[in-house]
Amino acid sequence: MRIVLVGPPGAGKGTQAAFLAQNLSIPHISTGDLFRANISQQTELGKLAKSYIDAGNLVPDEVTIAMAKDRMEQPDAENGFLLDGFPRNVSQAEALDELLETESMQLDAVLDLEVPEDEVVKRIAGRRVCRNESAHVFHVTYKPPAKEGVCDVCGGELYQRGDDSEETVRKRLEVYHTQTEPIIDYYKAQGLVVTISALGKVEDVTTRAMEALKRGEGDK
């Protein structure tokens, strides 16, 4: 299967992508991983991306698309893949369609992980990270430490990262609604969108997603 995974920040896309890719025996292609791999390996695309990042600029769509193209052409993606973090906007979605058409391929589904906005804020703003090198992660509601502000594992101080603050989370949601959410309507027009609730236990969401993908049901 060839799948695009979408959803707001805090929906658990990375976690679900890993489980779904394993269950479907297809590679999980994350744009974050692609950037890190290309930069660390100092590929031409990696050097180009790093030049934009170092200058404090967004990496242009064409660079991201080129990285994705290169990864999708690897042998392990011959029978399918799960894209996580790409496409991020309609222009990237259009470019992906053109790329797949050139390769005589097409998407099978766009899996939309649906989470209420208040739950997204609760999930992310409630995270607390250990300041020590271990960087163990806790949550004030879902995984509270035995002692407030203290890591259960090493006794280090727990803190809230700047990008986990409620204000930052809501700004990230605004970006998602403006830039990424429109691709859902774009793919709905193609009858590809499968929407599931991403609330509940991780394994329950995975089961829900697998069943929906097999049925091909959702907002089609």
Image (tube, rainbow, N blue to C red):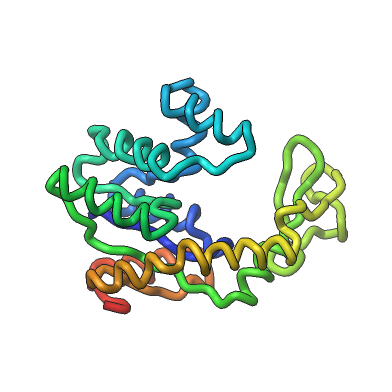
Q: Residue furthest left?
A: 104
Residue at 48 percent of width and 28 percent of height = 48
Residue 146 is left or right of residue 120, and the answer is: right
Out of 27 and 100, give the one closest to the viewer.
100
**How far from the left and from the top, in percent, is residue 1?**
23, 54
Residue at 23 percent of width and 72 percent of height = 191
Residue at 48 percent of width and 70 percent of height = 198
Task: Determine whether 59 is above or below 96 in the image.
Answer: above
**How far from the left and from the top, in percent, is residue 69?**
30, 39
**How far from the left and from the top, in percent, is residue 95?**
30, 50
Residue 104 is left or right of residue 215, and the answer is: left
**How far from the left and from the top, in percent, is residue 130?**
78, 46
Residue 149 is left or right of residue 91, and the answer is: right
Out of 24 and 178, give the one closest to the viewer.
178
**Quadrant of residue 56 in the image?**
top right
Q: Quadrant of the C terminus?
A: bottom left
